[in-house]
């Protein structure tokens, strides 16, 4: 089972596909989107480029069973890993 893992940071986007059955990376990529004055204006295109890197590495979209995204939210309400559900979104 392949899992897409995305980590959008302040200056870069990292994405990888992990074979969860053996906990082994299948493919990984990292793209810089800059900080402050060097920030790219089209983050959607940057995400698309990162995904294209994974597809070119041989990962098929159909092989993905799950996707996870690391979100850092500094605040008093979410102090541990939390599944995003309707309550969290509200």
Image: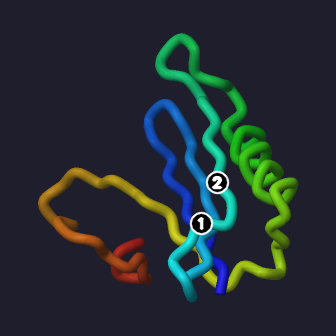
Residue 71 quadrant: bottom left
Badge 1 is on which residue? 25
Residue 57, how many percent across, how many down? 81, 56
1 or 71, which lies in front?
1
Q: CA distance from mark 1 to mark 2?
A: 7 Å
Determine the residue located farthest toward the left in the rendered image.
Answer: 76
**Image: 28 above or below 9:** below
> Could you tell whether 71 is left or right of 18 in the image?
left
- Crowdedness near tag 1: few (<14), some (14–19) or many (≥20) residues, C-alpha within 10 Å: few
Decide: few, some or many residues near mark 2? Use Cα within 10 Å; few <14, some 14-19, many ≥20: some
Q: Is residue 9 above or below residue 90?
A: above
Which residue is labeled 2 in the image?
Answer: 28
Instruction: Find out whether the residues at labels 1 and 2 contact each other: C-beta distance under 8 Å.
Output: yes
Q: Secondary structure at mark 2?
A: strand
Residue 9 rendering spot, x and y as whole percentages: 45, 42
Residue 24 is situated, as x and y percent measured from the top left of the image, at 56, 72
Q: Residue at x 85, y 64 (%)?
A: 58
Who is closer to the viewer here, 32 or 2?
Answer: 2
* Residue at (61% x, 78% y) in the render: 19
């Amino acid at each position: 089972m392949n899992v897409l893992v995305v980590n959008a940071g302040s200056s870069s986007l990292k994405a990888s596909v992990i074979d969860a059955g053996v906990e082994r990376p299948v493919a990984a990529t990292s793209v810089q989107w800059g900080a402050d004055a060097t920030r790219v204006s089209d983050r959607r295109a940057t995400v698309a480029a990162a995904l294209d890197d994974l597809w070119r590495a041989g990962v098929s979209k159909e092989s993905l069973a799950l996707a996870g995204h690391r979100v850092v939210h500094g605040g008093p309400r979410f102090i541990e890993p939390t599944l995003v559900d309707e309550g969290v979104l509200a």
